[in-house]
Image (spheres, grey):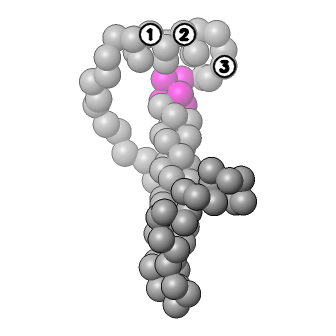
């Protein structure tokens, strides 16, 4: 395991109960294990969000740099209404 550091944190009672319940149920062996798992999930979710954001930024950039002429909004709406999409 990587080096560790002891922290003292304050969390809402609801979360404290959730942590204690998971340990009491035997799902985790300690409060710290619950928090570490939650932080790993949070970190992964943030990485996924960042990847999605990067993909969107790239797609927007490619769209803005597309040399093809833009389509007038009226034409887009006409095509949508006529079912030509």
Q: Earlier in the sequence, mark 3 or mark 2?
A: 2
**SS assignment at label 3:** loop
- At 54% from the left edge and 57% from the top edge, which residue is drawn? 77
Label 2: state its secondary structure. Answer: helix
Q: Which disc, if any, is residue 21?
A: 2
Residue 44: percent from the left, percent from the top?
Answer: 55, 49
Q: Distance between the residues labelled 2 and 1?
A: 6 Å
Q: Quadrant of residue 79?
A: bottom right
Above-or-below relation of 75 to 61: above
Report crowding for label 1: few under 14, some 14 to 19, many 20 or more residues within 10 A (C-alpha).
Answer: few
Which stretch did the figure color magenta? 30-34
Give the CA separation, mark 1 to mark 3: 14 Å
Asked if one can make out residue 78 in the rendered structure from this viewpoint, the answer is yes
Location of mark 3 (residue): 27
Name the disc covering residue 17, or none.
1
Label 2 CA crowd tier, 10 Å (few <14, some 14–19, many 20+): some
Question: Whole-percent x and y of residue 3?
Answer: 46, 53
Residue at x-position 47% and y-position 85%: 65
Q: Do the residues labelled 2 and 1 touch (CB within 8 Å)?
A: yes
């Amino acid at each position: 395991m990587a080096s560790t550091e002891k922290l003292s944190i304050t969390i809402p009672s609801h979360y404290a109960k959730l942590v204690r319940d998971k340990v009491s149920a035997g799902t985790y062996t300690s409060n710290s294990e619950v928090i570490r798992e939650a932080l790993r999930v949070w970190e992964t979710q943030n990485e996924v969000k960042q990847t999605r954001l990067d993909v969107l930024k790239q797609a927007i950039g490619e769209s803005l740099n597309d040399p093809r002429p833009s389509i007038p909004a009226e034409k887009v709406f006409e095509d949508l209404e006529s079912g030509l999409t």
